[in-house]
Amino acid sequence: MSRGDEFRRGWPTLSAAAVGVGTGVSGLAIYSAGLFTGDLGREIGLSAAMYGLSITLLTFGMALAAPVVGYAVDKFGVKAPTIAGALCLATGFAALGTVVHSVPAYMTAMALIGFFGASSGPIAFTRAVSSWFDRARGLALGITMMGMGLSGAIIPVAIGRVIELEGWRLGYLTLACIALAGTLPTIFLLKVAPRSVSTPGTAGRSADDGDDFATIRRNPLYWRLILTFGLMSVAFTGLVPYLVPMLRQYGMSVGGAASIASIMGLAVILSRLVIGLLIDILRPTAVAASLCLLCATGVVLFAVGGVGFAPVLAFTLGCMLGAELDMVGYFTSRYFGLAAFGKAYAGPYMAFVLGGGIAPLWVGAVVDRTGSYTAVLYVVAALTVLCAVAFLALPSPRRVTPAPSDTRPTPASVNADL
C-alpha cells in the first residue's frame, strides 16, 4: 500500500488522534498550569516551589498510570480508555475551579489528574494510528503529536484571555469543556484498522501481529529501549523550563528571551513533521542519533559563544522536544508489533515521563550549587552525545520482524541482528 493510500484510508483516525492528543492530559494540563499560578498564589497561597512540585506530581501520576493504561488499551481497545481518561480530566479541571481551596487540595488534584487522566494521553492514539500506517508511520505519528504542539500554541492564549475577562475559576471550567469536546472525534472517528485493511509489516504480516508482552519484557532490546528514552529525557528536558531564566541570567531582556522561547515552540511543531518523515525514508536509529548530536551541538555553541547562539540553542532543543514521543511510538511498534503495543509502549513512555519529572530537579540543584548554567550545559551536551551512541547501538527497526503472538519467539530470534 502506498503512502497516499494509507492517508486516504487512515485520515479519520489520524484527525481524531491529533485532536485527542491536543485536548488530552498532555495537551491541556501541562500547557495551561502556569496560567493560574498568579491567581492561585493570591487565593490559596501557592508558592513557586509548590507549583513546581505540583507539575512533578502531575507527571509522576501520568508515568505511574502508563502500565495500567497500556493494559486497558490492549484489553478494551482504544476508545473506552481515552474517553474515560478525558472524563476524569474534565472532572479534575472542574474540581480545580470549584472545590479546591487550599494548597494540599491543589497538589492532590494535580496528582489525581495525572493518574486518572493519563489514558487521554498518547498511548491509545498512537496505537490506533500505527494500525493504519506502515510506510508513512513516522509522518503519521508526527502529525498526531502536532496536536499537542498546536494545543501549546493555542490554549495559553485562549485560556489566558478567559482568565483576564472572567477569572481563573471559569478558566478551569473552560478547560473542562474543552476536554469533553475533545472526546467527540474519538467517539465518531477513532478506530483501529480491521485486519483486512491494516497495513502489512516487514514480513507481510497484519499490523495486529507481534510479540505478546511476556515475550517482549524478556527481550533485552525492550529494556535497552526503555533506558535509551529515559536517558534522552533526563539529558535535555530539564533545560527546557529553565531556558528563559537562563537567558535572563546571560543578560537578555524579558522580551528577547520570550522571542527566543518562541523559536523553540516553532521548532517543536516543525520537527514533528520533518523527523517523522525522515524516519520513514532513512535509517531511524541514525535519524534519532543525529537529532541528539544536533542538540548537543546547539548546547555547546551556546555554552562557548553565549547569547549570540541562543536562537540555535532554542531551535535544537525544540527539535528534540518535538520528536520524542513520536519516536517512542515508532520504535516500539517496529520492534514489537501491535499485538501488545499498549503494554509495550508504556515502558519507554513511562521512562521518558519520569525522566522529564526528574530532569528539572537536577538542573535546578546544579544551578543552585554553582550559581550558573555553565556546568549544566556541558552535562546536557555529554548526556545527549551518550544518547546518540545508545541509539546507534540499537538495531535498525526495519530489520526486526515482529513474530505473530502465537509463535512466541525467543528473545534471541528477535535480536538476531544485534
Image: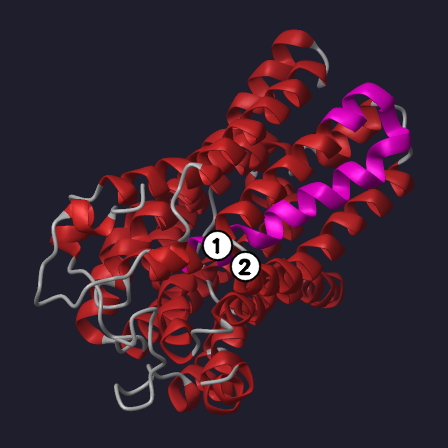
User: Residue 140: percent from the left, percent from the top?
Assistant: 52, 72
Looking at this view, name the residue that lies furthest to the top: 370
- Quadrant containing the N terminus is bottom left
Which numbered dot is residue 279? 2
Magenta stretch in the rendered image = 300-329
Q: Amino acid at mark 1?
A: Met
Which numbered dot is residue 263? none
Q: Is residue 323 left or right of residue 186?
A: right
Within-10-Å neighbours for mark 1: few <14, some 14–19, many 20+: many
Along the line of sight, the residue nearer the viewer: 162 or 26? 26
- Quadrant containing the C terminus is top left
Colouring used for the render: secondary structure
Q: Are marks 1 and 2 in contact (CB under 8 Å)?
A: yes
Q: Main secondary structure of the magenta part?
A: helix
Along the line of sight, the residue nearer the viewer: 400 or 64? 400
Along the line of sight, the residue nearer the viewer: 286 or 106? 286
Q: Is residue 103 visible?
A: no
The residue that appears at 62% across and 40% down in the rendered structure is 41
User: Residue 261: percent from the left, percent from the top?
Assistant: 78, 45
413 up-or-down from 296: above or below:
below
Q: Is residue 328 visible?
A: yes
